[in-house]
Amino acid sequence: MASRVHARDGFVAHVGRTTLETARALADVRTWSPLLVAQMRRLGVDSVPIALFIAVFTGIVLSLLSSYIFTGAVPFYFVGALVGKTVMMELGPVLTGMALAGRVGASIAAELGTMKVTEQVDALETLAYNPRAYLVVPRVLAATLMFPVITAFAMAVGVTSGWITSVNLLDLSTPEFFKGLRLFYRFKDIWFGLVKSASFGAAVALMGCVRGLDAKSGAEGVGQSTTRAVVLGCEAILVLDAFWALVLL
Amino acid sequence: MKRTNEFAVGLAVLLALALVVAGALWLSETDVNKTNVKAVARFRTVGGLGVGAPVTLRGVKVGRVEAIRLVEDEWVETEFSIDKNVELPAKPAVVVASASLFGEWGASIISYEPPPADPNLREALAESDRAGGDAWPGATLPDIGQLTAQASRIAGDVGVVTQRISQAFDSTALKNLQQSVKDLAVISTRLVGFANAQTTRIDRVSRNVATTSDAFAGVAKTFQNAVARLDTATSDNQLRDILANGRSSSQDLRQAAADLRSVMASAKANEVSLVRVIQQADSLVTKIQQGNGTLGMLATDSTLYRETTATVIQFRELLTDIQAHPKKYLKISVF
């Protein structure tokens, strides 16, 4: 038990140390800036399909579920309000973050873990490269910048799929759905979700980097690091979700 | 490869940015083309009204709430954007109210003249109007929560009353009530019988009335004939003559009455003398009846009558003798 607590404290300290070192490495723009766009493409643009796939079915399920809840009790146009609010403020950012935690976090942890166990990270240091600036900063920045972009697409697609479902599968007209969508809309609904998703991106990438750079013991260690990165990324998303709800709502 | 990455990332970022901006503008119904005009209304409270809430005119949405702010003197100013093509009332006012049971609030534009019938609403609008300035007068109706609280209080009162009634209606009261109901049923039965009897009588009376009515109809017909005759008489001036004679007779009667009144007055003036005369006459008659005095003797004694009769006989014999022998009694000589 004591060793677990010690290990947890050690991990927290390790994450804090890595974060501080990454922040310091931000100053080494020459090292990370050429790599940023490639990472944005790999972590962001290439993740759009999976995010949209999730968003489509989220919208469908939400509209059907809300119509099931509201039948006979609440006006039907509230389906639009529920779909809009839920997709923009919660399910869009969180489900996208979870999906990307699996895809991006695992990808980063596996890539950096392999580099670590094959001593490529040591080689970078030998070549006078700062591994934080070269490996961590571009990935964390790319995820932080691209998660909101992906989430914005997910929001739009989720609302659209909810609208199409409501019109075609439910007894709801387009004006009624949009009336509900606009009913309780605030601009905060959008930026709240985007801010959250940016923090999710930073956390997922950082966990992937931390766990990847901690990989030991060959391929098995890389696998374990990858698994831990995904789990930690998902946990970080949920903790941050509650944090932003407390702070911003 | 690097350019491909840059293009893909740039495209994704730009698309996401465009989606966010366009979506935000569309959802917030921002007036990009400046097709709206601004208006400000003043309230004591705006209830659950929020930015983005609909503004309606006669039930049609014509705008939205743009801003809500606290101002001095404990007022709340609300800024609206309203479609500039909408024809507003000459003196508009705004009423904020709950639009549904689910937390929706809306603002309705109404005409301040004439003021609304609700006295509370009228007073709130008048107070807001008295504050002056360019802001429209505004008032807020109670929300659903207040109404339900009021309804809950009423329901509580009803419950108390019901409890008291249940306490008042114990088993004895219930038996009395049942007995009363039975008595009422008996009374009702009697009333029905009475009503039936009265109905029979009323039917009979109705028939009598109908008969009487027929009789009256005959009388009316007769009267109509009389009137027709009267019309005929009127046309020959007979009625006028009758009326003139009547008027003349009336005047004569009036004169006679006046004379009678005069006579009566004189009689009243001579009443004492008359009484005395009557008394004297009465005394005289009494004496006569008693045979006192000359007249009494004349009235009661037949001697005078016999003497007078004998005298008359003698006088008649004398006249006969005179007629037979005038020269015996008359001697006429000329010169």
Image (cartoon, coloured by chain):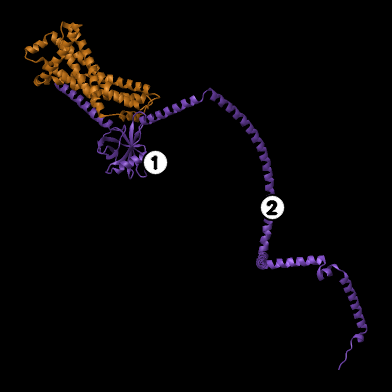
The residue under the point 73% across, 65% down is B279
Chain letter of disc 1? Answer: B
* Location of residue B274 (image quadrant): bottom right
Q: Amino acid at mark 1?
A: Ala
Left or right: A133 with respect to A78? left
The colour with which the image depicts chain B is purple
- Whole-percent x, y for residue B221 in the image: 68, 53
Amino acid type shown at disc 2: Val
Which residue corresponds to mark 2?
A: B219
Q: Which residue is mark 1?
A: B117
Instruction: State whether residue A86 appears in this view.
Output: yes
- Residue B1 shows in this picture: no
Element under disc 1? loop
Can you say which quadrant of the picture contains the N terminus of chain B? top left
Image location of residue B331, percent across then percent down: 89, 88
Give B321 or A2, whichever is nearer the viewer: B321
On the image, the x and y values in percent for residue B14 come to 20, 27
Label 2 or label 1, whichever comes before in sequence order:
1
Q: Colour of chain A?
A: orange
Residue found at the very far front of the displayed protein: B292
Quarter containing the C terminus of chain B: bottom right
Residue B328 as seen in the image, left or right of residue B99: right
Q: Crowding near pointer 2: few (<14 within 10 Å), some, many (20+)?
A: few
